Image (cartoon, rainbow, N blue to C red):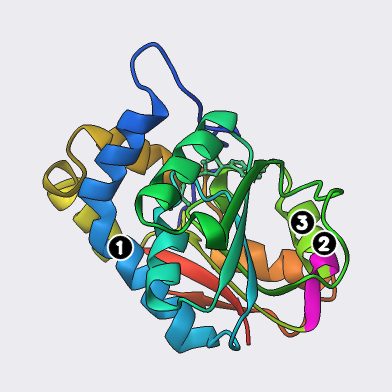
Amino acid sequence: MFLKPRVPEGGAIEDTDKMSMEKYSEIMKKRLGREYIKFAGNVITKVDPPKNSKVLEIGPGPGWAGIELLKKRKDLFLDGLEASKDMVRVASRNAADENLSDQTNYFKGFGEDMNTLPDDEYDLVISRDSMHHWDDPEKVFQEIYRVIKKEGKLYIQDSRRDLNLGGKFIVNLFGPIMAGKMLKYWKSSIAASFTPDEIRLMLEKNDLNDWTVEAYLMDLSIKKQ
Ligand SMILES: C[S@@+](CC[C@H](N)C(=O)[O-])C[C@H]1O[C@@H](n2cnc3c(N)ncnc32)[C@H](O)[C@@H]1O
């Protein structure tokens, strides 16, 4: 299959003159509300975090994915490591509005350098739709390996660049209805994302042999159970 080279997307998503991250948060909740609930369900069914897990979310953006997880699992505590200070502000507000301030702590930082976080700290690391923004995913994987407990779990989900005909059909035909004005961002996320094989290679190079990649029609996941 002919595969276009990656077109990386810049790292942090921040306020612009055209859109505040409060507005972005509102749009994402409206458009992707069900996807956030699905993600939270997947975390629970696919990796089943132990009771009272300490969770690290990388690139939470407005926070909706982790918030849905905490709504389902009130025993969890979540740290949100986010490259954009504007997203930190918005995620903290959204968690407060859901009465989840006591269970959440959002702070600015990059997945590639988690130097403020100790070794063997987290029972679960999650990330949704952020990996295609990472400048150096291998470095992020090495940092996750350092901060996650030996028996810790991992669930990362992102889009995939190597869409088959069915996937391309969905984006081009239903994209305008599904994504509206956000369609151009959806398309650029796909162009910036990795293929399952590219990720498998990165995991192999870093001896992350118990992390597995699963590929679906529109996206992919990396899992450690
Ligand atoms: C497309 S948004 C997804 C947000 C959220 N996870 C969701 O599913 O709605 C990607 C997020 O990752 C953040 N980000 C980008 N690069 C990052 C990095 N290297 N480390 C941490 N966060 C990063 C961006 O600032 C942005 O908030």
**Residue 54 at x, y percent in the picture:** 66, 72
The residue tagged 3 is: 138
The kind of secondary structure element at disc 1 is helix
Which corner quadrant holds the N terminus?
Answer: bottom left
The residue tagged 2 is: 142
Residue 97 in the image: above or below residue 103: above
Q: Quadrant of residue 213?
A: bottom right
Q: Nearer the viewer, mark 2 or mark 3?
A: 2
**Residue 11 at x, y percent in the picture:** 60, 35
Three-letter amino acid code at the position of disc 1: Glu
Asked if the residue at tag 3 contacts the one at tag 1, i.e. Cβ–Cβ closer than 8 Å, the answer is: no
The residue tagged 1 is: 35
Looking at the image, tell me whether mark 2 or mark 1 is earlier in sequence order: 1
CA–CA distance between discs 2 and 1? 28 Å
Tell me if mark 1 has few (under 14), some (14-19) or many (20+) residues whose alpha carbon lies within 10 angstroms of its own.
some
Q: Nearer the viewer, mark 1 or mark 3?
A: 1
Tell me if mark 2 has few (under 14), some (14-19) or many (20+) residues whose alpha carbon lies within 10 angstroms of its own.
some
Disc 1 Cβ-to-ligand 1 distance below 8 Å: yes
The kind of secondary structure element at disc 3 is helix
The kind of secondary structure element at disc 2 is helix
User: Which residue occupies the foreground of this view, 21 or 190?
Assistant: 21
The answer to whether residue 7 is visible is no
Q: Magenta stretch?
A: 146-150
